[in-house]
């Protein structure tokens, strides 16, 4: 049995953050496929046994069970010493970007992509227009930040960058727009992240792609 188990599925950018971090730090880990699209996270069993919040990702490590990707990233950075913000100021700065990302960057990209590709019926056009406006504005904020530094906190990648990776590498067709082309500094950052040893695409790293394929 592996040291870590990650409850996840290939379509989840929230889970990708944790899967990517595990790979980047060279952890001994196994994905546990969650049948999300058939309602697994809505069952009483999942909410009792795995996560009362009804979400993926969930990281199992010995007796520890962690959810919220930001918490998982913090835990793995503290244990491994890798991608860890250094000192109080950097820790707070990292947390600032993780919260911004969770709420306003990937926090909008995830629902937008879900409504466009997976929801039945697909998202209402007015909702899609609202979300796209928020996405454009918030990606522009990140793009400006990355136009003057290689990574979110400076010259070194941290868990804030791993968090930002969330949905950014999913195919442009799934959004109807190309994030890295529309936002060149983010595009350059995506290329830099891809050179990190252990980087893999979400569809390679987590089970269940294409949809309908069991993990
Ligand atoms: N802030 C959470 C978001 C997790 C999340 O929303 N995961 C989605 C899958 S991509 C989920 O499980 N959603 C279930 C629901 O909202 O009912 C994190 O970063 O871990």
Image (spheres, helix red, strand yellow):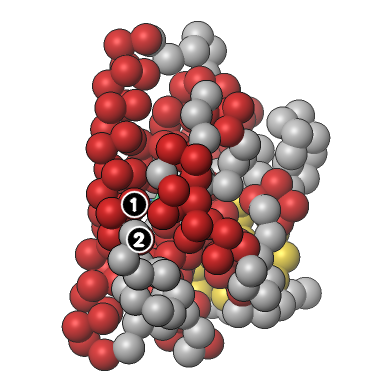
Circles 2 and 1: CB atoms closer than 8 Å: yes
The quadrant in which the N terminus is found is: bottom right
The secondary structure type at the circle numbered 1 is helix
Locate residue 131, reporting x and y percent: 32, 26
Q: Is residue 104 left or right of residue 197?
A: left
Q: Which mark is residue 143?
A: 1
Kindly identify the residue that appears in the image at 72 percent across and 65 percent down: 30
Residue 97 in sight in this render: yes
Cα distance, mark 2 to mark 1?
A: 5 Å
Locate residue 184, reporting x and y percent: 44, 48
Q: Is residue 205 left or right of residue 194?
A: right
The quadrant in which the C terminus is found is: top right
Kindly identify the residue that appears in the image at 40 percent across and 69 percent down: 151
Q: Residues within 10 Å of mark 1 (few under 14, many from 20)?
A: many
Q: Residues within 10 Å of mark 2 (few under 14, many from 20)?
A: many
The secondary structure type at the circle numbered 2 is helix
Quadrant position of ligand 1: top left
Locate residue 187, reporting x and y percent: 49, 51
Q: Which mark is residue 185?
A: none
Write down the quadrant of residue 214 in the picture.
top right
Residue 71 in sight in this render: no
Q: Which mark is residue 146?
A: 2
- The image shows residue 202, relative to residue 115, as above or below, that is below
Q: Nearer the viewer, residue 6 or 144?
A: 144
């Amino acid at each position: 049995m592996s040291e870590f188990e990650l409850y996840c599925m290939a379509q989840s950018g929230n889970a990708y953050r944790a899967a990517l971090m595990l790979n980047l730090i060279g952890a001994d880990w196994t994905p546990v496929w969650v049948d999300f699209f058939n309602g697994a996270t809505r069952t009483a069993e999942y909410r009792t046994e795995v996560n009362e919040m009804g979400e993926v990702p969930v990281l199992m490590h010995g007796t520890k069970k962690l959810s919220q990707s930001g918490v998982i990233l913090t835990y793995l950075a503290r244990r491994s010493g890798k991608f860890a913000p250094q000192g109080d100021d950097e820790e707070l700065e990292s947390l600032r970007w993780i919260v911004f990302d969770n709420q306003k960057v990937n926090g909008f990209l995830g629902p937008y992509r879900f409504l466009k590709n997976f929801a039945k019926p697909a998202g209402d056009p007015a909702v899609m227009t609202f979300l796209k406006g928020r996405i454009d504005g918030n990606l522009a904020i990140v793009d400006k930040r990355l136009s003057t530094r290689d990574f979110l906190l400076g010259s070194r990648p941290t868990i804030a960058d791993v968090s930002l990776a969330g949905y950014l590498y999913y195919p442009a067709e799934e959004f109807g727009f190309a994030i890295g082309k529309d936002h060149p500094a983010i595009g350059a950052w995506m290329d830099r992240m891809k050179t990190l040893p252990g980087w893999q695409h979400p569809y390679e790293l987590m089970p269940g792609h294409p949809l309908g394929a069991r993990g």
